[in-house]
Image (cartoon, rainbow, N blue to C red):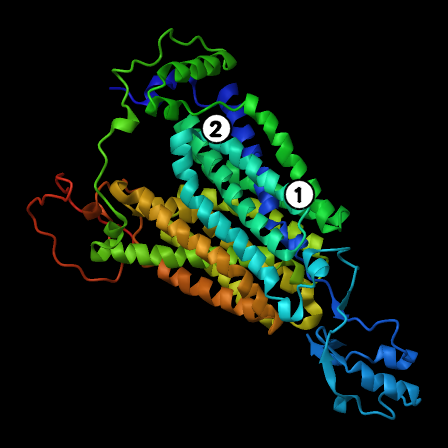
Amino acid sequence: MRDYDEVTAFLGEWGLFQRLIFFLLSASIIPNGFNGMSVVFLAGTPEHRCRVPDTVNLSRAWRNHSVPRRLQDGREVPHNCRRYRLAAIANFSALGLEPGRDVDLEQLEQESCLDGWEFSQDVYLSTIVTEWNLVCEDDWKAPLTVSLFFVGVLVGSFVSGQLSDRFGRKNVLFVTMAMQTGFSFLQIFSKNFEMFAVLFFLVGVGQISNYVAAFVLGTEILGKSVRIIFSTLGVCIFYAVGYMLLPLFGYFIRDWRMLLLALTVPGLLCAVLWWFIPESPRWLISQGRFKEAEVIIHRAAKINGIVAPSTIFEPSELQDLSSQKQQSHSILDLFRTRNIRMVTIMSIILWMTISVGYFGLSLDTPNLHGDAYVNCFLSAVVEVPAYVMAWLLLQHVPRRYSMAMALFLGGSVLLFVQLVPPDLYYLSTVLVMVGKFGVTAAFSMVYVYTAELYPTVVRNMGVGVSSMASRLGSILSPYFIYLGAYDRFLPYILMGSLTILTAILTLFLPESFGIPLPDTIDQMLRVKGIKYRQTPSHTRMLKDGEESPTVLKSTAF
């Protein structure tokens, strides 16, 4: 009985059809790059201070001293959330008293910004922060918006796979692309923060769903050798291209509503791809729709200039994926034995920490010294060499050492940021970008590593639980950045420390490089540093009735 790859081997690996699929599916990921990070500029918080109404009768001196000063990064700046009580300073002004000379400002009573705020327009003309005053007592709402987006990503992660299995990869890809673009467009008309946040949640649902659908569609259509490059480099680099476009749009469009409008245009252009991207023949076969699958394969052969056999698929010959025996495994099996329990717990910690670092550093670019748009662009550009390095490491270096090296690099430079003198702020930016490089490389490798650690019977489940931990990390990441309002270096200290601790933890995971994938739980490689009972020499019967072969041994460590 031949499998799909054997049946379609006559198409070749890298013909015109495969190149079209590779680049068109990768291009469909571009809007994900800027939609996911657009909140960096949509919710940017410019310099602000309490508004003093023009109707208040104050002398020039008292108007200039109406807001108390505070220390920030070693320099005095106007307080963002307090002002001197206007009734008192208006009285002093009427009496002709001078601030600082006749009146001790430190003894004056203060009040909150009862008349709103004045926002600097040096960087942004308007953001959701300036429109709805999401500062001071309401400053928690901006990071909440980002977290709600990632909650949408979490929900989309749950439903996207099931939807594409039921309705087809192509249908779900384009419906969720329309969902992402459509709800982004509706955000332009948001009347308040609550409406914007709910729509952003729905954008998150669509964003991850079309990413997953494109990823699955590409891996199912492309051949074995191209499939690896597509999943490790293709979608990642095109995501980074979309991320690079974001600061370009943001630089020329400083109003948040017009910026959102501009960011929806590429999504509309992706609608044209409907006529060029086919449904997955593998999925059609699993649904028993062999004739439709044959039509797609014949068209692929024509595009590649190859004469296809008149009959490609024999229903009696192919395995019907939908009728395969389902394994009786549940999520509890990820904790059934001591070894798989340790792998699962360590994987959850690994994914969550990497996600906090990646999204935390990406969202923190406006807070770095220098131009916010240049910093965001650098944060996107640094991902491209990180993905290339990750791919090279996966080809030639053991997994544990690759992961640990990338995480040590990312974590250590983040801890050094606090040691940089204030006048060398460009060095701080360089260190943060190196940290982003390391964390991004680790993020790219962790998918492959996790899939290799789990056995076939629970592999999808194990990767799914780990991915869920990643989503939880992304939900928490805005609040790591929020801590920067209390101490500028605190987010870097926390992210750097967690990343280094996770790098050490990674060294205790089994090594899977060059070792056949395990099929059963008993074949899993062992976590380092834990004593296990001696495996009986005789063959044991597994839960599913199969015989357990000898446990694979890792040659490293």
Q: Amino acid at mark 2?
A: Lys
Residue 105 placement: quadrant: bottom right
Residue 245 numbered mark, or none: 1
Percent coordinates x, y for residue 232 in the rendering: 47, 40
Pick whichever, 486 or 114, lies toward us.
Answer: 114
Q: Is residue 167 above or below residue 353?
A: above
Q: Residue furthest left?
A: 538
Q: Is residue 187 left or right of residue 490?
A: right
Residue 374 numbered mark, or none: none
Q: Is residue 360 left or right of residue 79?
A: left
Pick whichever, 329 or 385, lies toward us.
Answer: 329
Q: In 3D space, how far apart are the residues under numbered discs 1 and 2 (Cα atoms)?
A: 26 Å
Q: Is residue 335 above or below residue 209?
A: below
Q: Amino acid at mark 1?
A: Leu
Residue 327 placement: quadrant: top left
The N terminus lies in quadrant: top left
Task: Identify the residue position indicated by label 2 in the image.
Answer: 170
Percent coordinates x, y for residue 138 in the rendering: 63, 67
Residue 409 in view of the camera: no
Indicate the secondary structure of the residue bearing disc 1.
helix
Residue 111 placement: quadrant: bottom right
Pick whichever, 195 or 447, lies toward us.
Answer: 195
Residue sitting at 41 percent across and 61 percent down? 502
Task: Indicate which disc, 1 or 2, sits on the residue closer to the N terminus.
Answer: 2
Residue sitting at 57 percent across and 35 percent down? 178
Tally the numbered discs: 2
